[in-house]
Amino acid sequence: MAVSEQTSAPGAPAVVGDTPTHCPYCALQCGMTVGGAPVRVTPREDVPANRGGLCQKGWTAAELLTVPDRLTTPLMRAHLDAPLEPCTWDEALDRIAAEIARLQERHGRDAIGVFGGGGLTNEKAYQLGKFARIALRTSQIDYNGRFCMSSAAAALNRAFGLDRGLPVPITDLARADAIMVAGGNVAETMPPFMRHLTEMRERGGALIVIDPRRTATARQADLHLQPTPGTDLALANGMLHLAIQEGLIDEEYIDARTGGFEQVRLSVNAYWPDRVERITGVPVPQMREAVRLLARGRRSLILTARGAEQHARGTDTVTAFINLALALGLPGREGSGYGCLTGQGNGQGGREHGQKADQLPGYRKIDDPAARAHVAAVWGVDPGIIPGPGRSAYELLDALGTDDGPKALLLFGSNPVVSAPRSNRIEDRLNALDFLAVSDFVLSETALRADVVLPTTQWAEESGTMTNLEGRVLRRRRAVDPPAGVRSDLEILAGLAERLDAPGTWSTDPAEVFDELRAASAGGLADYSGITYERIEREGGVFWPCPSEDHPGTPRPFLDRFATPDGRARFTPVEHGGAAERTDRDYPIHLTTGRVLAQYQSGAQTRRVAPLVEAAPEPFVELHPDLAERHGVAEGAMVRVTSRRGTVAVRARLVDTIRHDTVFIPFHWAGEGRANLLTNPALDPLSRMPEFKVCAVRIEPIEQNGADQ
Ligand SMILES: Nc1nc2c(c(=O)[nH]1)N[C@H]1C(S)=C(S)[C@@H](COP(=O)(O)OP(=O)(O)OC[C@H]3O[C@@H](n4cnc5c(=O)[nH]c(N)nc54)[C@H](O)[C@@H]3O)O[C@H]1N2
Ligand SMILES: Nc1nc2c(c(=O)[nH]1)N[C@H]1C(S)=C(S)[C@@H](COP(=O)(O)OP(=O)(O)OC[C@H]3O[C@@H](n4cnc5c(=O)[nH]c(N)nc54)[C@H](O)[C@@H]3O)O[C@H]1N2
Ligand code: SF4
Ligand SMILES: [Mo]
């Protein structure tokens, strides 16, 4: 397909033709065709994930291409208090290169931080990691995936030796006997995913949902467990206790395929049902029913999402669910197992190619000499110049502008002013920087604070690959020409690498970068070396690992063995510790945060799409009518919610679907209603995941006449 070099104004993208590609948003990566004038999207029937379905965000995705405030020229601030003003690409890139040189000269290589995103294509994520390591030679790189799936990743690595979201193709789900979703509201976060669950239920399978709220997903479940936020670990241990007590565990499988069960068997002795009911608030008969449903057939899946994972004990919580899955004999069997639902468009691939602080491409460890030698050879550099591991995402943001932290930040594909925990602190840190550069296609709340803003291409204007929640590598295809004046992230990195006299090659062609990524990943855990653009087109995607061009790819990775040294899955005993911050007299209520259907993440994209704004115009706090009454809060009234870190003012939404002791605020909005002014950045010791899903708050009505109570 020929792509015209001609460019056009932002209001009217020149259409290349009807092009099959994938949605700009979440990890389901629904297939869609983009084309027509004006440009519109139509769902594809040939992509198993969505089979002709799209959610409201997908249906309206074409509007993203024509948002009125689309960035089409680089912007620069002459000095701290000066406004952002248009400049040329040379001026912008020269300024960034000069600031890098100046700050590294004065403070060393680690003076420059890099922050990436799980929405970036594999090619961009790879190039960004390489840019940090050999152009900047900084260890200070991490990305927003740390806020997303890092706890599941750590638990998957610990148990199975491999971090792959779903262990089976999505089409296996409909044939399951039971699926338990812990902390996922897929009816809003991946609506077409529900088709697979509905089909399973129509065939007689059971859906179990664990969520403190009776969500749209929970309403479609056969069984809904409604725990106190932050208590899933105890719940999973309690379910394992019951499985043992009722003789439902699979001893033969445990002997043949796992190690370490005896310790776990002993440790869950202490999780007798009544005690677990007291910790979690889930009645014992419901726990028992869940275990029976999971154990009754041979094909069951336990899936976790952010509700169970975004905790200071997230890794251990996921481990508790994996222990349960292993004891029931599920992982490594066709159509069953444990899986994590990845979140961002390239949530899976984004963490495999080296934008994480401790990783090199192919999911290699940056402190492994063999890994460094392999990747250095592909990059054409001495392994000695590749830095060691750096700080995790929150720690990196938290260190900005401090004595030993980075003095400048280059940011691609994230909006931490809205999405980072304790975001007022992160705003302060960003303000303390000597220099901030942001690449984005809109002026996000973070880009607004930058010294240089680089206008970049977006999904339908570029090509590359994305790895969806199944581990299937897909092609993102260019469907329209980008507006005049914008450059791709690959072009931006190449322009900077050239100015910094960086070693290595800096192609701006995604296909060439993908070929280099294949070589860099060869022999690693996430081996993409057998995947080519042609194969992806021909086969409708290829599952990694895929170590050679005649390898079929790996839709079900653990059928024969796990990726551990002895091929066995590992049990690890884990203990309930509860939320990092307890409720008390001053802050008596649990706050949890999450998503609504019509908004995406920090909202930088979806708050610019009119039908989505109409559907979800403003932040709100969801609370139970009984709790509202106790606090004198009426439906639709403005409420002040306060934690130890900050205060927000949001409108009350009274629902009887939430626990009495818990309130919920979605995190998609900036300003006064920003949920992350409240959240607790307590970090998981292994994954460094912040505790987005539970902290302690109090609520007060705000009087209509403006006076406070
Ligand atoms: N509409 C929309 N869709 C999205 C996104 C979006 O921003 N908007 N983002 C994408 C991304 S990056 C991600 S990571 C996924 C996230 O997808 P999900 O994990 O499904 O989304 P969340 O709303 O963050 O959390 C899910 C549920 O966890 C529950 N929960 C809160 N605390 C707890 C707890 O302690 N235990 C349990 N068991 N549940 C709890 C919440 O009530 C919520 O209903 O969605 C993806 N899809
Ligand atoms: N309270 C609370 N906070 C949370 C969560 C929660 O559940 N509760 N969830 C967390 C999770 S799971 C996640 S994933 C994070 C996400 O939060 P963020 O990291 O802020 O994610 P986005 O809003 O998707 O920001 C992406 C930005 O990059 C831009 N962008 C998109 N594609 C590209 C690209 O290809 N190149 C460049 N240069 N820019 C691009 C977009 O316009 C947008 O401004 O939020 C986390 N924060
Ligand atoms: S479910 Fe996700 S991938 Fe599918 S249309 Fe909606 S946002 Fe896009
Ligand atoms: Mo995420």
Image (cartoon, grey):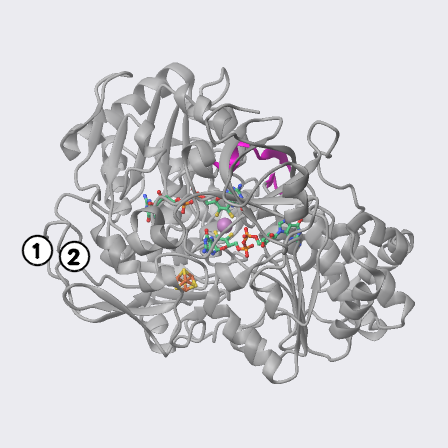
Q: Is residue 293 left or right of residue 489?
A: right
Q: Nearer the viewer, residue 312 or 489?
A: 312
Q: Which mark is residue 86?
A: none
Q: From where the camera sits, is residue 506 visible?
A: no
Q: Is residue 113 visible?
A: yes
Q: How many marks?
A: 2
Lower sequence index among marks 1 and 2: 1
Residue on which disc 1 sits: 6
Residue 481 is marked as 2
Where does the image place residue 590, in percent across and percent down from the top left? 67, 40
- Say few, some or many: other residues with alpha carbon within 10 Å of mark 2 (under 14 / 14 to 19 / 20 or more): many
Please tell me which residue is depicted at 21% across the width and 19% down the height of the picture: 78
Vertical placement of 360 versus 218: above or below? above
Q: In this rendering, is residue 8 above or below 179? A: above
Dot 1 crowding, Cα within 10 Å, few <14, some 14–19, many 20+: few
Examine the image and state in which quarter residue 439 appears.
Answer: top left
Most extreme residue toward the front, as rendered? 705
